[in-house]
Amino acid sequence: MRSEPSTPTRPTVREAFLRLMRELGLDTVFGNPGSTELPMFRDFPKDFRYVLGLQESVVVGMADGYAQATRRAALVNLHSAAGVGHAMGNLFTAYKNQTPLIVTAGQQSRSILPFDPFLSAVQATDLPRPYVKWACEPARAEDVPRALLRAYHMAMQPPCGPVFLSIPADDWDRPCDWVDVRHVSHAIAPEPQAIARVAEALAESRRPVIVVGAGVDRDDAVDRVVQLAERHEAAVVVAPMSARCGFPERHRLFQGFLPAMREAIVETLAPYDLILVLGAPAFSYHVEGSGPHTPATARLWQIVDDPQVAAWTPSGDSVVASIGLAVDALLAGPGPRAKRVPPAPRAAVAPAPASDPMSAAFALQTLDAVRRPGDVVVEEAPGSRSTMQRCLPMAGAQSFYTMASGGLGHGMPAAVGVALARQRQQQPGRVICLIGDGSSLYSIQALYSAVQWRVPMSFVILNNQRYAALQDFAPVFGYGPQDKPAGTDLPGLDFVALAKGHGLSGRRVERAAELGPALHAAFEDAGPNLVEIVVN
Ligand SMILES: Cc1ncc(C[n+]2csc(CCOP(=O)(O)OP(=O)(O)O)c2C)c(N)n1
Ligand SMILES: [Mg+2]
């Protein structure tokens, strides 16, 4: 490998890249290295840290959780085409989550690329498309630092998302020029006339409902949305498949969750005359539907930061804007013209019986009783999602994360990433990774990273020995009552053994009476641990 030392006036690509990383606050690298990346981190600065993921889906998932919890782009380092391949599932999820990530991947040295060398990536920038907003292999080595700055701003620009840089291994020792950090204000103010129309519709409405999506918490606007709802006595529901908590779920105005089904959405929203969708598609569907997308008697206004989503929305009108600025504008607008009757509070959920084996409802009600106010839930337990929504209400800003994509394998590492961010920010509370037995195994090596960084978190595995979501969903696709989909039972898995194999302590709970004490003990621990709950 050739090496041209820097001259007194010109730094190497590595020096300029690292200085820019530091100035952008990118001092944590999530990666899994190979030979093509080794030159990048020679003389790795002492004030940086390298968070190793044992598989690239873990790397990207951790970076996603970290970026979401810090609300800043995170840097990912992958190994050539193979590393990008392993990362792809969680890259798809990061794209759907609108998580700002700068994904770098090593490429073979430029001088041997004509000979299809070992580990070279053919059309490297095409591989992660279409799930990156921008992909670049700089034309010259000296363009690499500037590409990082552009990548950072592209990732942070709404809609946020991953971007990709392919960097040849022989670039790092080449001379280049320093690149100074530039700041870009990324927030988008709503067009004044358009937001005035929304404010007017809200003031005139007799029964408004606000539909909150992940964009609310992403833009740090949960508390302002609470103010808006209270001012208008508006009902609040969560958008289908929302990946974050947009409203405190014990609030008197909170009315529950929209399913990802067209007819059911129309039915749920039928009592309202104004539907204000904040930071969500209107709407995300999981199955086919027919008929109207919104009730005929309601007017829909959507505020989103993603022009693509605004473009495909089938009914109503949209304003493209940052949610926080748009809600600020609505708060400055008129209050309700006529007195409003607030929606009736939701009925309390009955306690689930303490049966053996336990129900998921009992397990989650017990978890709700044991967890503490500052704790954060990162969830991936598809078959228990609706039970969680009933039994484990989330507190509001930065209290809940799941994936927007539907792709499993995000929850385990994302929880570690959120815990790493909270550890760094010295925030109190634990991260609770609530995860299905099946889901946990798509990126189980996240356990190892949790141990290495001693993050305050508990993996709570809901072990029902099956892919319940698929078995429960089968009738929708014409399966008979006795007709179980092939490949959906998961017998014989031992999560305490899997934890032990990664250096993590775990306990298995089979009896209802033991669950409360076991969760208490786990949550008292300063470091990471695992609780496997056997449910029916
Ligand atoms: C990457 C990926 N592969 C497969 C699926 C299909 N899938 C959806 S839910 C599910 C089962 C999840 O099982 P588990 O985590 O045990 O939760 P449960 O359904 O039992 O609550 C599967 C396999 C998916 N969504 N993503
Ligand atoms: Mg399961």
Image: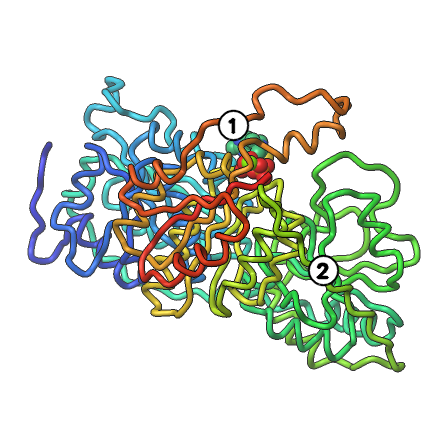
| Residue 18: image location, x then y, percent | 22, 54
Q: In this view, does 507 lie above or below 319?
A: above
| Residue 322: image location, x then y, percent | 59, 64
Tell which quarter ligand 1 is in.
top right
Q: What residue type is labelled 2?
A: Val
Residue at the spot 56% in from the left edge and 61% down from the top edge: 368
Q: Quadrant of the N terminus?
A: top left
Q: Quadrant of the C terminus?
A: top right
The answer to whether residue 406 shows anywhere in this view is no
Residue 125 location, quadrant: top left
User: For the residue labelled by badge 2, is the local secondary structure a helix, a strand or a loop?
Assistant: loop
| Residue 423: image location, x then y, percent | 33, 63
Q: Nearer the viewer, residue 226 or 449?
A: 449
Q: Find out whether the residues at labels 2 and 1 contact each other: C-beta distance under 8 Å.
A: no
Q: Name the residue under label 2.
A: 349
Q: Residue 278 carries which label?
A: none
User: For the residue labelled by badge 1, is the local secondary structure a helix, a strand or a loop?
Assistant: loop
The number of callouts visible is 2
| Residue 192: image location, x then y, percent | 70, 72
Badge 1 residue CB within 8 Å of ligand 2: yes
Residue at the spot 42% in from the left edge and 62% down from the top edge: 430
Query: How far apart, in angstroms, are the residues tagged by discs 2 and 1?
Result: 30 Å
Q: Mark 1 points at which residue?
A: 490
Q: Is residue 1 left or right of residue 99?
A: left
